[in-house]
Each structure stands twice: as C-alpha cells, then as structure tokens.
Image (cartoon, rainbow, N blue to C red):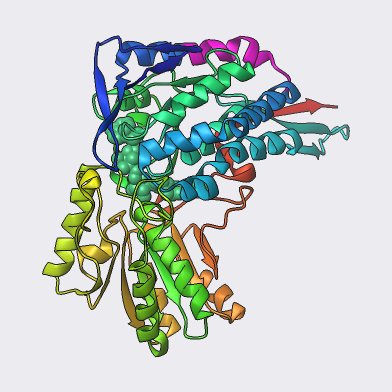
Amino acid sequence: MRQINNFINGEFVASGIGKRFDKRSPVDNQVIASIAEAGQAEVDQAVSAAKHALAGEWGQLSTNDRVDLLYGVADEITRRFDDFVAAEMADTGQPHHVMTHAFIPRGAANFKVFADIIKNVPTESFHMDTPDGRGALNYGVRVPKGVIGVVAPWNAPFLLMTWKVGPALACGNTVVVKPSEETPLTATLLGEVMNKVGVPKGVYNVINGFGPDSAGEFLTRHKDVDAITFTGETRTGSTIMKAASDGIRDVSFEMGGKNAGIVFADCDLDNAVDGIFRSSFLNTGQVCLGTERVYVERPIFDRFVTALKEKAEGVTFGRPTDAGVNYGPLISQEHREKVLSYYAKARADGATIVTGGGVPDMPADLAEGSWVQPTIWTDLPESSAVIQEEIFGPCCHIRPFDSEEEVIELANASDYGLATTIWTENLTRAHRVAGKVDVGITWVNSWFLRDLRTAFGGAKQSGIGREGGVHSLEFYTEMRNVCIKM
Ligand SMILES: NC(=O)c1ccc[n+]([C@@H]2O[C@H](COP(=O)([O-])OP(=O)(O)OC[C@H]3O[C@@H](n4cnc5c(N)ncnc54)[C@H](O)[C@@H]3O)[C@@H](O)[C@H]2O)c1
Ligand SMILES: O=C/C=C/C=C(\O)C(=O)O
C-alpha cells in the first residue's frame, strides 16, 4: 500500500492531525494508497516555507538560472515519463493511450513553454514630454506576485496542476499545491523531481486533503497566500472567491462548462463525427472542454446520429494497460452516482436513448469500478437539466437545427461560456459564427488542439481571467512602473 505524504520545504511530511484517507482505484474500487491529510499546521508550514523561499536562494536567482532549473524539471519529467503515466493511470483509471498521448506530455511542456516566454517577453517603456522640455522616461518592471495557492481538480491532474505551477515558477513565485483528494499521486511525484533537479526547498509544496474545513480551505483563507489559481467546479469557485476576498487576493478561475458542438451540413462528416466522439467521450467525458450539447443541421442529422452511435458502441472497456482498452471508468463511485442521476433525469424528461443510459456488464474483477455506458440522447427539451447543467460524464444530447441564427441562440443559451466546436467547410461562416458564440475558446474543425501561447479561459460562469502565453504573466506577476525625470 503506497503511503503518500505532504511535501513541505523539500521533505515528505506526515499528517500533524494524525489523519489519513484512502485513495481507491476507479477501476475496481480497491484501496491503492493511504494519503496523509494536511491540517492547519501543515498548511501554515507549507505557506511559510514558500514565503521563506522567496526571500532566499530562489528569490535571488537570475531569470536565466531560474529558467535553467525549469528546463531541468521538464527534462526530469520526461526521463520519468513512465512513472508519471503509471501514477496518473492509478489515480484516474484512464487508458494508457490517453495518458501517453493527451495528458502526461503536457507536464514537461507546461514548464518549457513558460520558461521560454519569461526569457523573451518584453516589458514596456514610454518617453514623455515635460514642460521644461527635458522629458521623462517610464519603464515597466515585472516582479513575482509571491506565494501562489494552486487548487487543482482530478480530471487531468498532472496537466492541470503543471499548467499553473509552470508559469507561477517561471515568473519567480513559489507555490503551495492542493491536488484533488481523488488524485494525489502525480503532485507528490513532482516533489521528487523538484528535489532531484535542485529546485530550492520551499519553492514547490504539496498539501493533501479536502476542500471545506480541510487543506483546501486552510490554503485559500491563508493570510500569507498572495494569489489563488483554481480549477474546478463553478460552485467551488464561488466559495473560494469568498475566502480570497478576506485579505483581498487575486484569483484566476478555470471552471465548469456545458459546451456546444455545432455541426453544419457542409462539414466533413467523418471528421465531425470523430471530433464530437473524442470531445464527448475522451477521459470518459471528464474534460471541461468536452461536448455535452451537439447541434446538427437537419439535412445530416440522422446520418450524424447513426455514425456517432456506432463509434460510442465501439469502445473497449477495461484496465488502463489492458490491450485495446480505449475507455475507462469515472473517477469515483460518488461521481458515478452523479452521472447516473442525470441518466435518470434524461429518462424522466422523455429523452430518446440512442445508446447507453446505464451501467455496462463488467467482469467480476471490475464490477466494483465506477463504470457507466457511453450515452447519447435526442428529443429532450432545452430546458432539461441534462441540457443546462454540467454532467461531466460520457454523454451528449443531439438536436437538429435549421438556421445559423437558431443554432447560435441555442449554443449561447447557457450560464457557462467555456468552449465551442464548429464543424463546417465554409470558413467564412466559421469566422462569423465563432465571433457570435459567447465562449472563451472556439475550435473549428478540431478539438482540444492547444497552442500554449494563446489565451485560455472561460466566459460567464466558466471562469475568471485568462492563462496561457503572456496572459499567464498578467496573473503571475505584478507590473511596476518607474518614472525617471531627465
Ligand atoms: N475550465 C477548466 O480549464 C477546467 C479544467 C478542468 C476541470 N474543470 C472543472 O472542474 C470540475 C471537476 O473537477 P473537481 O470535481 O475536482 O472540482 P471541485 O470543484 O470539486 O474540486 C476542485 C478542487 O477544489 C478543492 N476544493 C473543493 N472545495 C473547496 C473549498 N471550499 N475550498 C478550497 N478548495 C476546495 C478540491 O479539493 C479540489 O482540489 C468540473 O466542473 C470541470 O468542468 C475546469
Ligand atoms: O478538463 C479540462 C481540460 C483543460 C485543459 C487545459 O487547461 C489546457 O489544455 O491547458
């Protein structure tokens, strides 16, 4: 049984409150690790270590030396690639291919891309005229914000945690990371990497535990945390925002979505079906950018539904490393109950169940896992909770539409505004529609194609702020101005 401890000031630390919690495999619900729960004392120690590191060696490093260390972290992650793949498969139960091709490679990338940006990004300078004719020079200086609280989710734990830690460290901050209680393993492994590479103690810290009245809340309420970056459910973001306001801390929130896929009749149908299949069922539908609402132009509606049904029914369930497995379980029994409750709501609201809607028959050794069938519905009213609320599972509803104006209205009728995909061979129309959908990210004839230099974040209830490229610097640094009279 793996014993997972907190990582504070370069040391693995047990729970000061003597509490540990079990990590269960999503595949068969067996306990695979025992996790030390950080109490207030451990959170205080972690924040204090992060604060002292700022004043110590880390804070004195030149940008180039800091960047060299981050490149070292990326290289060590790559060297231990298989360890990170194994840890994340144990945590999430997701297939090997999903780890090796979608999620784990982003760990090293999230450090490299921001190491490169911080080395090359300009600041600003202005010359101003003055009445005496001698003028003045203004110049901007970026400085680290300080101790960053990182609160991460369970659906792509390593990708999403390093998506925050990479830029935070590149900008000279220190971090205290609170991974999800569901997926603690890769954040702990990264602690080993930090020590191996020689990142000064206290720069990277990990506290394990839960949200309310546990490590998450202790971190987001801590007076010495200078900013909070959070990825998770919208309602959790609302709670954290209240905590952050006690002490006035900046926040960056990447939250829920109820993303629309818009499929026009002139699309490349095979590409559109493949793209919607991936965006609805990758990671068992547990991707914030995924598609749970599909709108298909009427002339191809029946063909599209038939083709997506065939792909959904062709998945192979099983353990992450079993040959041919391309479909895993949900993260936990609790989340499975949530997803199944929406499967029941769909039936109650009169959905036509095109495929799925229940629990697959699994072999005895997997029967206790958090498995659900990939599911497709049609014929629901837009007012159904299935259409309005984030399910975060392997399911989507498909509805026909007859005009561009109609589908834009349908797509925008959501409290969320994270992502949209548009499938059409008419790029003039793609540009036009992309300009009218109220989301942070729109993909055309593609999905989850990520250039890490671009602005990433959600509108409406899907987020606050943008990260990615220089946008991350706006959150992870303070820009100061110096004015020199000539
Ligand atoms: N927009 C994005 O980029 C993005 C990316 C991934 C996931 N998500 C969203 O995340 C959600 C799934 O992740 P989840 O179930 O882990 O989300 P969650 O909100 O339940 O938990 C996220 C993290 O917040 C912590 N937390 C919970 N309550 C807290 C509190 N009161 N104070 C401090 N910390 C607290 C949890 O322990 C966990 O570490 C989905 O809604 C998904 O859409 C969004
Ligand atoms: O589940 C949501 C995945 C979000 C992905 C990113 O934040 C990213 O690609 O940077």
Q: Quadrant of ligand 1?
A: top left
- What residue appears at the point 58 percent right and 80 percent down from the top-left corner? 425
Report the number of numbered marks: 0
63 relative to 364, above or below: above
* 418 sits to left or right of 221: right
**Residue at the image position 81 percent from the left and 32 percent from the top:** 136
Closest to the observer, 127 or 346: 346
Residue appearing at x 23%, y 64% in the figure:
386
Residue 450 point in image, percent of width and height:
58, 53
Q: Is residue 343 visible?
A: yes
Region rendered in magenta: 49-62
Location of the N terminus (image quadrant): top left
Residue 395: x percent and y percent? 30, 63
Given residues 32 and 213, the one toward you in this image is 32
Quadrant position of residue 357: bottom left
Vertical relation: 469 (above or below) 111: below
Q: Position of residue 479 (x, y in %)?
A: 64, 32
Query: What's the residue at 31%, 18% (across, down)?
Result: 36
* 51 inside magenta stretch: yes
The quadrant where residue 480 appears: top right
Residue 470: x and y in percent read 64, 43
Residue 123 found in image quarter:
top right
